[in-house]
Amino acid sequence: MTVRVIGAGLAGCEAAWQLAKRGIAVELYEMKPKKYSPAHKSADFCELVCSNSLKAERIENACGLLKAEMRLFDSVVMRAADAAKVAAGGAFAVDRDIFSKTATKLIRENPLITVINDEVTQIDANIPTIIATGPLTSEALAGEISRLTGSEGLYFFDAAAPIVEKDSIDMDKVFYGSRYGRGTDDYINCPMTKAEYDAFYNELISAETAPLEDFEGAEVFEGCMPVEVMAKRGEKTLLFGPLKPVGLVNPKTEKDDSYAVVQLRQDNREGTLYNMVGFQTNLKWGEQKRVFSMIPGLENAEFVRYGVMHRNTYLDAPRVLNRYYQMKNSENIFFAGQITGVEGYVESASSGILAGFNMAKKLLGEPFFEPDKRTAIGALPLYISDESIKKLQPMNANFGIIKSLDFKVRNKQERYLKIAERALETVKNALSEEKI
């Protein structure tokens, strides 16, 4: 009984580790050092190609909570991270070389994990396989995944608009409505006066953009237009595009005299998250926070994810995967990592934990480990597999997708702490029933 795990990044190593913990032999395929993607430089596993930060450490932060939950699963990534930790204030940062070398050592020394340095270009649906090749999946394997999932099952570029928590929107300054009276009033509308629009426009066109890496081609921009690029075509261009105010009557004034209107569209079933319609952007994250907070109603908005525009191969998970990270139409195939639609180092690793865990459950003939929406590690697969989402945007861990408390807590940090404490207890209780 052997499982193929493709990719020795954070998600692949976690999947292999969880399988081995349950007595399952693993063939871990990694194309490095025979072949490198344009972003990878090291032959070691779990290479951090961008930041060396695993984000916040405290459990009142959703990513901090996720790391605490992962430790309860004996995460190999967290073992390596603890060994490589460096001072970074409230963040959890690591020495990236020590981190990768520690993870590589732990994986290579596991007697149930055999490392095979070769590129995989074909998937046999009869062989239990976890695909964890990340956003820079090789062209040949991406083509094979497209074959498995169908031509519409795979996105090659991530052009995503920012998403904010509804609770952080100043509802006194916005109103519900839908343009031209079509459909129900499902959009949150942020009206702007001419003076407000002019100030916003001037900051938008002068804001600093993020540099595109050399492996990200110009074709990124073929399918959509960054809002700042659109704005630079003319002062009124946005007024005939995503900020078009026509047909939006503000019930507070009973007039449709807004100079511009930014629309927010519900992004999850519970209505706790809203995305900014038409705001795909390549602005730096700090600039997004600064400029987009000028929009009336969003002055204190909590951004659960910022807009991104870069190469990011990922699945149309709501159509392709179930809540166990398993393919709906091929029960032997699981996916893990950013290719599933989760976003971030820690989130990717967490998906590897559950993919490996549930692949082991399948092979052992035991009931799957059920993701729980009261936890960060469970809320992520439940979000990306939610069939009500028509166009998935990759998602970080955040409290907007975790089930809220059954009682009110006014102070946000106290509320998040109580949610985190409940989450950790939920995971502990679930794992106490496992024979691991």
Image: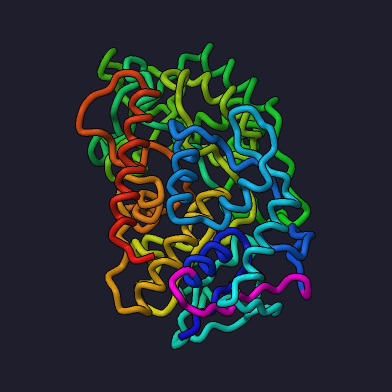
User: As drawn, which residue projects farthest toward the left?
Assistant: 406
Protein image colouring: rainbow
Left or right of 397? Residue 230 is: right
**Quadrant occupied by the C terminus:** bottom left
Quarter of the image where one finds residue 370: bottom left
Q: Nearer the viewer, residue 384 or 116?
A: 116
Q: Is residue 211 magenta?
A: no
Q: Nearer the viewer, residue 78 or 214?
A: 78
Q: Nearer the viewer, residue 14 or 410?
A: 14
The magenta stretch is: 21-34
Left or right of 208? Residue 389 is: left
Q: Nearer the viewer, residue 19 or 110?
A: 110
Residue in view at x 67 percent, y 79 percent: 116
Residue in view at x 58 percent, y 79 percent: 27
Left or right of 294? Residue 104 is: right
Residue 143 in view in this figure: no
Residue 287, how many percent across, how many down? 63, 27
Residue 315, how many percent across, how many down? 48, 63
Residue 151 in view in this figure: yes
Q: Is residue 27 magenta?
A: yes
Residue 173 higher or lower than 277, as above or below: above
Left or right of 260? Residue 407 is: left
Residue in view at x 50 percent, y 63 percent: 336
Residue 266, how many percent across, how many down? 34, 39
Quarter of the image where one finds residue 39: bottom right
